[in-house]
Amino acid sequence: MTTAKDLFIIAMDPGPEHPVGQGDLSLALAGAELLDLTGTGAVTLDGEHVVPGGTAVPEDRLLGEAAELITRQPPYERIEDWLWRRGEGLAAVYQDALEADGELRQQRSGRLPFGPKRVELVETPGRRRAVGRRQEGEPVLAALASVVGLDGEPSDDALQLGDETATIVIAAVHDAVMELEAVRQRRTIENTAFANIWRGP
């Protein structure tokens, strides 16, 4: 299992007070992938840029797909740009992959056989590992969970990790999530104003 899969699992785990938005989660998953790729040596960071590293292919399929998307020629991609490009729809990709791996299953809610389906976690070693990492307060996973609101608003301390690479990526994820929230708020205001125009005084 990877940090991204662990993050998806704890985001799906029952109990969070506030459900995680798909856009926020997708950005955080892209950040988790980037951290895993730096851990394998597939990429390194040069300031705010993602630089390709060794040629080893990650064993995890989704992480391998992420590695293939790394820009190989200069000018290298900025971390923020990577998060937006890789993150588009990434939560749905992880849901499909974890369903295929048996980590998730679709369950009909209610008694009717044709009722709406919901996705739930299966009790697997992968789930136990992810929950264990969270309970132990593993810094990177805890910081990513905090950024997407699983543990309330992230504090400055939660975003300052001992590892410089992790701190840079987590900060970039936090900024991207904040930017996405600003876009949501702007659209809400615009839609409300538009509706008021049509309603009239």
Image: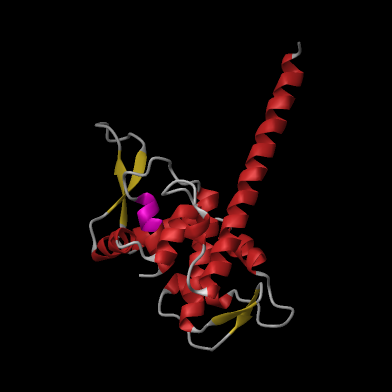
Would residue 9 be found to the left or right of residue 171 on screen? Answer: left
Which secondary structure dominates the residues rendered in magenta? helix
Above or below, comparing residue 185 to residue 21 in the picture? above
Q: Residue furthest front?
A: 157
Residue at horizontal 65 percent and vertical 33 percent from the top: 188
Residue at horizontal 30 percent and vertical 40 percent from the top: 108
Residue at horizontal 50 percent and vertical 84 percent from the top: 41
- Judge by depth and name the residue closer to the eye, 109 or 63: 63
The type of colouring in the image is secondary structure
The x, y position of residue 136, in whole percent, is 30, 63
Q: Which quadrant: the N terminus?
A: bottom left
Q: Quadrant of residue 83?
A: bottom right
The x, y position of residue 147, in whole percent, is 50, 54
- Judge by depth and name the residue closer to the eye, 152 or 107: 152
The x, y position of residue 134, in whole percent, is 33, 59
Would residue 136 be found to the left or right of residue 172 on screen? Answer: left
> In this picture, which residue range is highlighted in magenta?
8-12
Would residue 139 be found to the left or right of residue 104 on screen? Answer: right
Residue 97 in sight: no
Residue 146 in sight: yes
Above or below, comparing residue 141 to residue 151 in the picture? below
